[in-house]
Amino acid sequence: MNEKLNILVIVGTTRNARSGKQISDWYISEAQKTAGDLMDFKVVDLQEWDLPLFNEDTPPMYHQYSELQNKIAGEIDKADGFVFVTGEYNHSIPGSLKNLLDYIGAEWNKKPAAYVGYGATGATRAIEHLIQILSCLGVASMRGHITVNAIWDALDGHGIPKDGYWFGDFENHLQELAWWANALKAARE
Ligand SMILES: Cc1cc2nc3c(=O)[nH]c(=O)nc-3n(C[C@H](O)[C@H](O)[C@H](O)COP(=O)(O)O)c2cc1C
């Protein structure tokens, strides 16, 4: 039997009052119900990682990594694919997420990513920017996003998006990710 795919769920915002963690907790519980037999979902919480602003001497493409870059690379390298959970800040991704992406290069390459967005209108503009940035890192982007609108009203008392506020099809979203993660894993090997 095939091993389960290792999927990193990256929570891109860091402020204490963020909605990002509630959205990622909900996403992971739905994803486990839908595709827990195919994939293991592990959280990368940028609030916990608490990365300083990127200020390394050498651009990551030269692969002369500092200790911190090696630590980040070690985590990203283990993944077969990614789910980015992003809010929308000024029609783009939060600076904290861009900061992570600038730290390392090769370890993102030839892997797939799926997207979960939340904001006024599902962070769709942020997701489009993120896809553009990740194309520079050689990441293959999935089409079927999960989005949450009107985030200020969307969550119930348990932090779960109410019906009518969230959109997307978990089954298609996860099947697409699993297909690409398996295909690219085989190709990398
Ligand atoms: C600096 C900032 C800029 C924002 N800009 C947008 C925006 O352009 N579009 C949008 O839909 N929501 C915007 N919002 C609202 C966020 O989508 C909403 O606050 C969301 O919960 C942010 O993610 P977080 O709570 O995980 O930090 C902005 C919020 C902040 C803090």
Image (cartoon, rainbow, N blue to C red):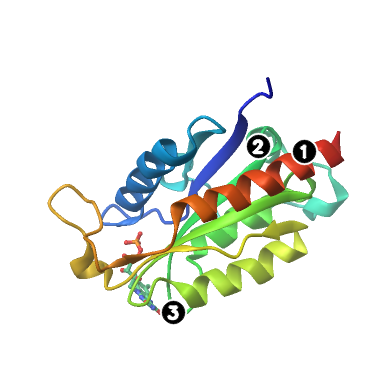
Q: Is residue 150 above or below residue 78?
A: below
Q: Is residue 129 above or below residue 10?
A: below
Residue 132 in sight here: yes
Image quarter (top left, top right, bottom left or bottom right) of the C terminus: top right
Q: Nearer the viewer, mark 3 or mark 1?
A: 1
At horizontal 39% and vertical 53% (from top left) the residue drawn is 14
Q: What SS does tag 1 mark?
A: helix
Q: What SS does tag 3 mark?
A: loop
Mark 3 residue type: Asn
Q: Is residue 43 above or below residue 133?
A: above
- Camera-side residue: 85 or 52? 85
At horizontal 44% and vertical 58% (from top left) the residue drawn is 169
Q: Is mark 3 within 8 Å of ligand 1?
A: yes
Q: Which residue is identified by label 2? A: 79
Provide residue 66's location: percent of width, then percent of height. Answer: 73, 39
Total numbered labels placed on residues in the image:
3
Disc 2 residue crowd, few under 14, some 14–19, many 20+, Cα 10 Å: many
Q: Which residue is identified by label 3? A: 90
Mark 2 residue type: Ala
Q: Which residue is identified by label 1? A: 185
Disc 3 residue crowd, few under 14, some 14–19, many 20+, Cα 10 Å: few
Q: Quadrant of ligand 1?
A: bottom left
Q: Earlier in the sequence, mark 3 or mark 1?
A: 3
- Camera-side residue: 44 or 34? 34
- Camera-side residue: 86 or 188? 188
